[in-house]
Amino acid sequence: MDVLQRARELVHGAERMVALTGAGISTDSGIPDFRGPEGVWTKNPAAEKLADIRHYITDKLVREQSWLGRLEHPAWHAQPNPAHLALVALERAGRLGAIVTQNIDGLHQKAGSAPDRVIELHGTLYESVCLTCGDRRPMQETLDRVRNGESDPPCQRCGGILKSATISFGQPLDDRVLYRARVAALTCDVLLAAGSSLTVQPAAGLVGIAASAGARIIMCNASETPYDGVAEAVLHGPLGKLLPALL
C-alpha cells in the first residue's frame, strides 16, 4: 500500500480528526512562509527582528517598520486555496472537529471553516491590541490612522503601544487558546499536520501529545519535520495538491 492510500484510509476512517496547520498551507494563496526556501526570514534574516516583542517594545523604528508591513500584508487580498477548501470539505463530512492553526491570516474562516472550530494559536492579524490596557480594535481602523500619517499610532484609550493581536517571539500564548488546542490533540483519533515546520513550541508539541494519546498522525509538508518519526503517513509536496488528494 502506498503512503497516499494509507493517509486517505486514515482520513476516511476518522471520527474526531484535528488539523494542525502552519504557514505552508497559505503559500499557494500568495502568503510566504518564514523558514522555507523562499521564506521571509530565509531571504532576509533581519526581518525576524520584527517578530520579537522585545525589539518591538523598545525600538520605535521596529514598530514603524511593522506598521508599514501590516499595511501591505498579503493577507488582505489573499484567497483560500484548495488546501483550505479540502479541510472545509472534511469538516462538512463530519470527520474534522477542529483546526489548530499557527497562522494569523484568517484564510480558514474565509474558506468556510466554522469560526468556533478554528483555534488560532498565534492570534489574528485582523485586530490591533494595546500592550498596556488590552484595548482591541479592528485592524483596519488602526491602519487608517497609519495611512493618515501616524507612523506608530498609540492606544486611543491609554496612550500605550499598539500591535497586531498576534503572538510575537517572547510573548506567551493565551492560556485559554492553548488549553483548547491541547484538549483537541488529546481527544482526536487522527491528527493531520499540514504546512508546519514543527520547530516552534508549544504548537509543535501538540503532535507528540496526540500521538501519546493514541492518535494516528499524518504529516503533509514541503520538507521533513522533527516529528516525521511518529507519523503513520508522511507526504511531501505542495499542500494545494496533497490535501485534496486525501478526500
Image (cartoon, helix red, strand yellow):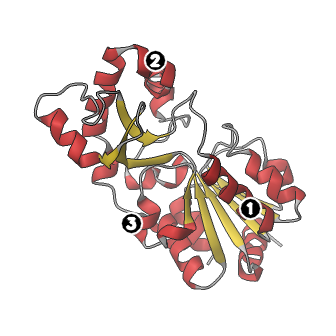
Give 72 or 148, whichever is nearer the viewer: 148
* On screen, residue 58 above or below 238: above
Q: Secondary structure at mark 1?
A: helix
Q: Position of residue 7 (x, y in %)?
A: 74, 70
Give 179 or 184, whichever is nearer the viewer: 179
User: Residue placed farthest to the bottom in the image?
Assistant: 93
Quarter of the picture holding the C terminus: bottom right
Q: Position of residue 129 (x, y in %)?
A: 38, 40
Give 164 or 211, whichever is nearer the viewer: 164
Which residue does the image show at 79% across and 68% down from the upper left?
187
Mark pair 2, 1: CA separation: 33 Å
* On screen, residue 65 above or below 123: above
Give 14 or 147, whichever is nearer the viewer: 147
Please give the label number shown on residue 65.
Answer: none
Which residue does the image show at 25% across and 25% down from the upper left?
152
* On screen, residue 57 above or below 36: above
Please give the label number shown on residue 183.
Answer: 1
Mark found first going from the N terminus, 3 or 2: 2
In the image, what residue type sits under mark 2? His
Quarter of the image for residue 204 reads top right
Q: Secondary structure at mark 3?
A: helix
Which residue was labeled with disc 2? 55
Mark found first going from the N terminus, 2 or 1: 2
Quarter of the picture holding the N terminus: bottom right
